[in-house]
């Protein structure tokens, strides 16, 4: 209503004051100024006005009675019957439970003397303790209601006439669009829905529902014929697929048998490769042991070569000593010969010395012969020692080659063992894959 709109204007200014955008005094002044010039009702919407009172009857704003502002007007404003109007407004608001009240009063119209009923409507503004209100003459309200009633009645009659005309036009349009009576069309559609594609559909105007239904039935007949043909083709194809499935089953059985054989062979091959790997590992261990033994033999031969070299050196030293002894024996023989010559010159006096010289010479000759024999033996020993040293050296070189060969054999066997181990792992994986493939084939 208009009073509710005026109340909303006041509440809007009250909210501005509460938010701090305006002071309370400025907000109240702005609200009073806004309602002072507000009008509604009448032919031009400028007949009725708004007023504001406190709930105690003090004037706040009246557009035509500014002298009432700020004055306690209880008992001072009376209607045409002598009733206190402000008291009626205050009592009406006090008895209201929702802050709204209708208060009947009597006022003469402007320019007239006879009071007529005027209904006042007031709404309370909480917080400011105001009552915003306005009044309407009840005969004006009755006139407006009668005018609204006749306007509504005319509108209803116009609507009924329009609905009748529209219904007639729609009925004709529907019959035209259906192509016949709706009951007939429904009966034909029921037969088609039940599967009777031979239902007789009468000729209907092009574009109508019955014409479309006729085309639909013809299309359904054609579609059913095509579906029947396709069904026959599907049946033939299904037979071929079944035959193909049987062939596939036989081939799958053959494949499963071959996979079983392959799996068995792979297991045997895995076992053989594992045995080969174990044998290669054993051979590797034996080759490693042989390499260690050959290495120790090489060390022994090296020590023998060193010993033979020491013996050869000692034999050479002994040969030198024998040479010295032979030289001494030769010198002794010369001395004994000279002594014998001197003893012969001495005659009878040197006979004893001659005997001694003869014995010394004999000893020197035997010593020389013995030294010669020893030298001959030692030379033979030196030759044999040299030959033995050479043989031992050759044996050491051969032993070194043996050690190198055994080491190479050990390395090769180790590589064979590693390769065999990798082959064993690879074959085991292949064997697992073949077993899985065999299981899948058996399931198929």
Image (spheres, rainbow, N blue to C red):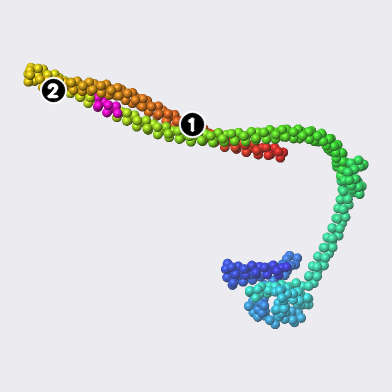
Visible in this render: residue 205?
A: no
The residue where tag 1 is placed is 412
Q: Nearer the viewer, residue 243 or 354?
A: 354
- The magenta region covers 311-319
Q: Is residue 434 magenta?
A: no
Quadrant for residue 382, please give it: top left
Residue 405 place in picture, x, y as percent: 44, 29
Q: Nearer the viewer, residue 427 or 98?
A: 427
Q: Relative to 428, does residue 90 appear above or below in the rendering?
A: below
Q: Is residue 368 left or right of residue 79?
A: left
Q: Please identify the quadrant where the N terminus is shown.
A: bottom right
Q: Which mark is residue 356?
A: 2
How packed mark 2 is, by other alpha carbons closer than 10 Å (few <14, some 14-19, many 20 or more), is some
Disc nearer the start of the sequence (1/2): 2
> Which SS class for mark 1?
helix
Visible in this render: residue 245?
A: yes
Q: Nearer the viewer, residue 409 or 74?
A: 409
Quadrant for residue 264, please give it: top right
Residue 260 place in picture, x, y as percent: 67, 35
Q: Residue at x 83, y 64 (%)?
A: 150
Residue 390 place in picture, x, y as percent: 34, 24
């Amino acid at each position: 209503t208009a009073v509710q709109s005026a109340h909303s204007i006041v509440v809007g200014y009250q909210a501005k004051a509460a938010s701090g955008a305006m002071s309370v005094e400025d907000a109240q002044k702005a609200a009073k100024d806004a309602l002072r010039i507000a009008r509604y009702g009448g032919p031009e919407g400028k007949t009725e006005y708004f007023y504001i009172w406190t709930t105690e009857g003090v004037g706040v704003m009246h557009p035509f009675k500014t002298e009432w502002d700020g004055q306690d007007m209880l008992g001072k404003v009376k209607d045409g019957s002598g009733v206190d109007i402000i008291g009626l407004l205050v009592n009406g608001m006090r008895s209201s439970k929702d802050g709204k009240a209708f208060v009947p009063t009597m006022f003469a119209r402007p320019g007239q003397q006879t009071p007529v009923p005027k209904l006042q409507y007031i709404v309370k503004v909480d917080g400011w303790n105001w009552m915003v209100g306005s009044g309407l003459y009840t005969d004006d309200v009755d006139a407006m209601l009668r005018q609204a009633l006749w306007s509504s009645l005319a509108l209803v009659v116009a609507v009924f006439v329009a609905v009748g005309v529209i219904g007639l036009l729609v009925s004709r349009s529907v019959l035209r669009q259906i192509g016949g009576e709706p009951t007939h069309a429904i009966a034909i559609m029921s037969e088609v829905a039940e599967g009777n594609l031979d239902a007789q559909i009468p000729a209907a105007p092009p574009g109508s529902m019955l014409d479309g239904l006729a085309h639909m039935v013809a299309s359904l007949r054609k579609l059913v014929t095509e579906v029947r043909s396709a069904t026959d083709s599907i049946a033939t194809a299904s037979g071929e697929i079944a035959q193909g499935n049987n062939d596939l089953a036989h081939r799958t059985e053959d494949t499963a048998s071959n996979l079983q054989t392959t799996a068995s062979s792979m297991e045997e091959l895995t076992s053989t490769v594992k045995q080969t790997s174990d044998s290669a590992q054993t051979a590797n261990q034996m080759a490693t042991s042989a390499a260690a033994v050959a290495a120790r033999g090489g060390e022994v031969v090296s020590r023998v070569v060193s010993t033979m070299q020491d013996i050869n050196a000692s034999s050479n030293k002994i040969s030198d000593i024998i040479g010295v002894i032979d030289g001494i024996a030769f010198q002794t023989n010369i001395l004994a010969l000279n002594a014998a010559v001197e003893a012969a010159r001495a005659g009878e006096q040197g006979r004893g010395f001659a005997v001694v010289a003869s014995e010394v010479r004999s000893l020197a000759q035997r010593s020389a012969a013995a030294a010669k024999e020893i030298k001959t033996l030692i030379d033979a020993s030196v030759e044999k020692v040299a030959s033995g040293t050479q043989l031992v050296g050759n044996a050491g070189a051969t032993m070194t080659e043996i050690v190198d060969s055994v080491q190479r054999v050990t390395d090769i066997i180790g590589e064979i063992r590693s390769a065999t181990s990798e082959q064993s792992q690879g074959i085991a994986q292949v064997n697992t894959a073949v077993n899985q493939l065999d299981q899948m084939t058996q399931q198929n």
